[in-house]
Image (spheres, rainbow, N blue to C red):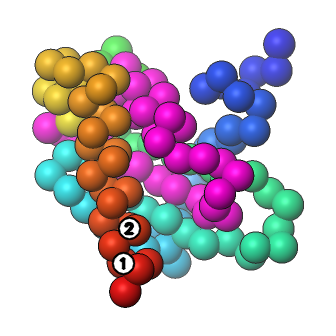
């Protein structure tokens, strides 16, 4: 048992407040109605793996609700992002409205929201 979570040993998470602060301060962000995605480009020669942090406000609900949203967002993110194709750290900030989307549509709704915010980052790269 590896204990890395999200079904894959290569998936890592941001857990230290300093890592989050670095991504917020030095990274770029894109926002939709339900999510804000921060990304921080790391040194391509770095052997570190892609990392994800998820931030959910207390406005979303009690601890059980917030943890459910975090779990669903992490799973949805890893189904949409290939860790071998990028060299970035990501932070997903959940806006309170994401709770309703996840309650109504579950994982599929979270995947739609993540696709929407990821599309904004791809549009920026292509220009």
Q: Quadrant of residue 37?
A: bottom left
- Asked which secondary structure carries label 1, the reply is helix
Q: Around disc 1, counting alpha carbons within 10 Å, would you say few (fewer than 14), some (14 to 19), or many (20 or more)?
A: few
Q: Quadrant of the N terminus?
A: top right
User: Is residue 6 located in the magenta-colored stretch of the structure?
Assistant: no
- Give the magenta part as a residue range: 68-97
Left or right placement of residue 119 versus residue 15 in this view: left
How far across and down, in percent of the image, does residue 110 sit?
Answer: 30, 33
- How many marks the image carries: the answer is 2
- In this view of the protein, which residue sits in the foreground, 115 or 62? 115
How far across and down, in percent of the image, does residue 87 sit?
Answer: 67, 64
- In this view of the protein, which residue sits in the foreground, 122 or 67? 122
Q: Quadrant of residue 94?
A: top left
The residue sitting at the front extreme is 126
- Asked which secondary structure carries label 2, the reply is helix
Left or right placement of residue 62 versus residue 97 in this view: right
Left or right placement of residue 93 versus residue 98 in this view: right
Q: Which mark is residue 121?
A: 2
Left or right placement of residue 120 versus residue 90 in this view: left
Q: Around disc 2, counting alpha carbons within 10 Å, would you say few (fewer than 14), some (14 to 19), or many (20 or more)?
A: some
User: Is residue 96 located in the magenta-colored stretch of the structure?
Assistant: yes
Q: Is residue 13 visible?
A: yes
Query: Are dots 1 and 2 in contact, CB under 8 Å?
Result: yes
Task: Look at 80% across and 57% down and name the residue there.
Answer: 48
- In this view of the protein, which residue sits in the foreground, 116 or 64? 116
The residue sitting at the bottom extreme is 127
How far across and down, in percent of the image, does residue 117 sit?
Answer: 31, 56
How far across and down, in percent of the image, does residue 81 sit?
Answer: 53, 47
Q: Which mark is residue 109?
A: none
Q: Quadrant of residue 62?
A: top left
Q: Quadrant of the C terminus?
A: bottom left
Q: Which mark is residue 124?
A: 1
């Amino acid at each position: 048992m590896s204990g890395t979570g999200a079904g894959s040993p290569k998936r890592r998470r941001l857990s230290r407040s300093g890592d989050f602060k670095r991504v917020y301060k030095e990274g770029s962000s894109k926002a939709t109605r339900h999510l804000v995605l921060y990304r921080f480009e790391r040194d391509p020669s770095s052997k570190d793996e892609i990392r994800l942090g998820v931030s959910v406000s207390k406005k979303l609900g009690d601890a059980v609700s917030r943890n459910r949203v975090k779990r669903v967002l992490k799973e949805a993110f890893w189904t949409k992002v290939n860790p071998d194709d990028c060299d970035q750290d990501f932070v997903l900030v959940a806006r309170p409205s994401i709770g309703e989307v996840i309650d109504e549509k579950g994982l599929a709704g979270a995947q739609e929201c993540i696709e929407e915010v990821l599309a904004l980052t791809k549009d920026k790269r292509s220009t």
